Amino acid sequence: MSTLAQLFDPSAFAIVIAGTALATAARAGWTDLKAAGGAFVRLGGSSFDADANRVALARTASAVDRDGPLCADVPMPPDPSLARAIKAFIRHTSLDAFHQVRRAERAMREAKRAQAVRTFEYAGELAPVFGLVGTLFAITQMVSDAGGAAQGTLAAIGTAVLSTLYGVLVAHLVCLPIGQAIERKGEREEAEREHLSNWIDQHLRAEPDSNANRIVPVPRIRDVA
């Protein structure tokens, strides 16, 4: 415990963390920071429930098969992207509309994921730089205190070494791993979403033929009277 306590320097840690955060915010901008924050918050859980969406899409396929796309009371999947694609198909009764919304939603998700990953990569690049800044700051303190006590000089040397250490650790144990975790999670959810989208796409593609062959009796005027 005493060794660990010796490895903690509040001033060096504050320089690395505060400097990295400010420089990352300045480089990334508000939009990328917002995407990175949202992706980090969702990292602990799954934002895409494959089982719930699979059940909802099965009910959607059954309703369209039974009543046709115009008359079906279609339950929407809980995933907003899939729901918007299904709504486009129901509104326009067109697979082209379904695919257009599907491609647009995927492009938007990929763009947001790229923004989040890029922001944490920026932080990973900048953390060692501010570790060096902390080292230079400690050296200046040591030079200004050259005529002082040896204890102050040793403390400045410790701050200089720990600043570099903090910068490397924050970059390679925090920022870059978080960015890669966001990328892996996004790719895994995207694969699950694409699998379900392909399934419902194949089913909807078969619907126009079956609905076209459905014979709807036309009532005669005498029967109506």
Image (cartoon, grey):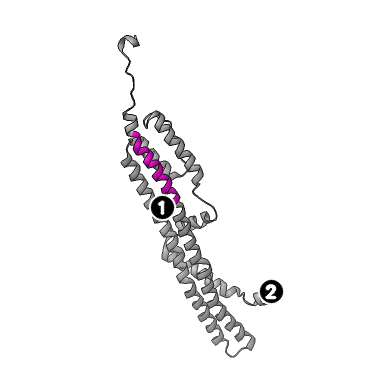
Q: Is residue 121 above or below residue 131?
A: above
SS majority, magenta: helix
Q: Amino acid at mark 2?
A: Met
* Position of residue 4 measured from the top left corner of the image (x, y, whole percent): 65, 75
Whether the magenta-drawn stretch holds residue 206 is answered as: yes
Label 1's element? Answer: helix
Q: Which residue is mark 1?
A: 109
Q: Amino acid at mark 1?
A: Arg
Label 2's element? Answer: loop
Q: Residue 215 sits in which quadrant?
A: top left
Q: Quadrant of the N terminus?
A: bottom right
- For the point 45% across and 38% down, which residue is it? 58
Horizontal side, residue 183 vs residue 2: left or right: left
Q: Is residue 119 above or below residue 9?
A: above
- Can residue 76 be seen from the camera position used here? no
Mark seen at residue 1: 2
Mark 2: few, some, or many residues within 10 Å (few <14, many ≥20)? Answer: few
In terms of depth relative to the viewer, which is nearer, 143 or 32? 32
Q: Is residue 181 above or below residue 56?
A: below
* Position of residue 6 measured from the top left corner of the image (x, y, whole percent): 64, 77
- For the point 39% across and 56% down, which residue is it? 111
Q: Quadrant of the C terminus?
A: top left
Mark seen at residue 222: none
The residue lying furthest to the bottom in this view is 147
> Which residue range is magenta in the image?
190-207
Horizontal side, residue 170 vs residue 107: left or right: right
* Position of residue 189 measured from the top left corner of the image (x, y, whole percent): 46, 52
Q: Is residue 86 above or below residue 5?
A: above
| C-alpha distance separating marks 1 and 2 | 45 Å
Mark 1: few, some, or many residues within 10 Å (few <14, many ≥20)? Answer: some
* Position of residue 38 measured from the top left corner of the image (x, y, whole percent): 49, 55
